Image (spheres, rainbow, N blue to C red):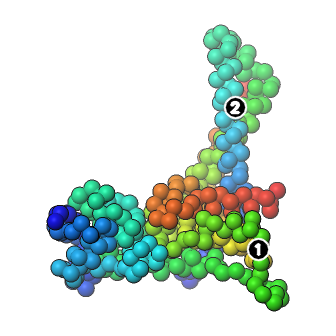
Amino acid sequence: MVNRVVVGAHYGLRDWIAQRVTAVIMAIYTIALVMFLLAMPSSYENWQSFFRQTWVQVLTQVSILAFLIHAWVGIRDLWMDYVKPVGVRLTLHVFTIVWLLSCFVYSVKVVWGL
Amino acid sequence: MEKVRFSIYRYNPDVDAKPYMQDYVLDIEPTDVKLLDALVKLKASDDGISFRRSCREGICGSDAMNINGKNGLACITDIRSLKQPIMLRPLPGLPVIRDLIVDMTQFFKQYHSIKPYVVNDEAPPEKERLQSPEDRKELDGLYECILCACCSTSCPSFWWNPDKFVGPAGLLAAYRFIADTRDTITNERLDNLEDPYRLFRCHTIMNCVDVCPKHLNPTRAIGKIKEIMVKRAV
């Protein structure tokens, strides 16, 4: 392969918006969660029943998904900024995707108590 | 007569194995106001010191350098406002040709990649292409760029990917032509920038805004490019 600088992948906007939108989702979830947890008496049973409500589970799962998408864009940015060899970068991208996907599958188990 | 201490980056690739910092003490007169005045005086005593300068009034952008760790123009920097010894280094991130002179090829390559001129294929009117005062106003804060490279060479994203990231100066210029109502290839310009490297390496670090000697705001221009892209996409 010739050694040429190639740019023009024609993507980036979607990821950039996704990073901002997911940040807002995480911020709202964090504030809401802290307020709810402060409002109720702190005990294991209270926490368990709180997180067993479907709407809490749905919001938690969505926020975790937002977190993972956010992390994907952020970590990929790191690899793009600092790692130059394409082979190493591709490997790191794949590792990151597999890792985040695993986190997602595990989060489903945790959130829904499967 | 006042004494000013300097520590200046010296490197002559023909002679020096490695760059080094050289100390100088210079007597300045009350009439020596700007850093460039002192540098010119210094060069009279040691003509080996190399730096670029031309207009000596902040218009040409030739004498951009790293002054006490911050990029700026020597000709508009008040010498008495600087902490001594005044550390002078070449602009960071670009190959050094000699002393304070850097090779700006990469910088201008990025600038040219955004087509820094109005493109309009419509038949030219009898006189000039007119703009409303409001449309013209959008170009304020964009057209004043003197391409001194202070911003791009203070940008970590440009340090890491100077061959792929357009950099703040190039993107400010890109928005200047995207915003120009006389230009007809807005879509092509946006396509050209819709890329994870060319535009989206900007992480809003804002070093560019901090150092711009013309007080321009490349970060805002980059934000406006993204805004237009969002408008086009959703």
- On screen, residue B11 versus residue A105, left or right, reads left
- On screen, residue A9 versus residue A2, left or right, reads right
Category of crowding for the residue at label 2, using alpha-carbon neighbours closer than 10 angstroms: few (below 14), some (14–19), many (at least 20): some
Residue at image point 40% right, 64% down: B71
Residue A68 in which image quadrant: top right
Residue closer to the observer: B82 or B22: B82
For mark 1, what is the residue? Answer: B131
Image marks 2 and 1: residues in contact by CB distance under 8 Å: no
For mark 2, what is the residue? Answer: A29
Q: x and y percent of residue B201 in the render? A: 58, 61
Asked whether residue B60 is in view, the answer is: yes
- On screen, residue B160 versus residue B181, left or right, reads left
The quadrant of the rendering that contains the N terminus of chain B is: bottom left
Category of crowding for the residue at label 1, using alpha-carbon neighbours closer than 10 angstroms: few (below 14), some (14–19), many (at least 20): few
Residue A28 is tagged as none
Residue type for callout 2: Tyr
Residue closer to the observer: A47 or A10: A10
- In the image, residue A1 above or below residue B151: below
Residue at image point 47% right, 75% down: B59
Q: Chain of mark 2?
A: A
* Farthest front residue in view: B31
Residue at image point 27% right, 77% down: B40
Query: What element does badge 1 sit on?
Result: loop
Which mark's residue is nearer the viewer, 2 or 1? 1
Residue type for callout 1: Gln
Q: Chain of mark 1?
A: B
Residue closer to the observer: A100 or B71: B71
Query: What element does badge 2 sit on?
Result: helix
Between the residue at mark 2 and the residue at mark 1, the CA separation in whole angstroms equals 47 Å
The quadrant of the rendering that contains the C terminus of chain B is: bottom right
Residue at image point 70% right, 80% down: B118
Across the whole image, how many numbered discs are drawn on residues?
Answer: 2
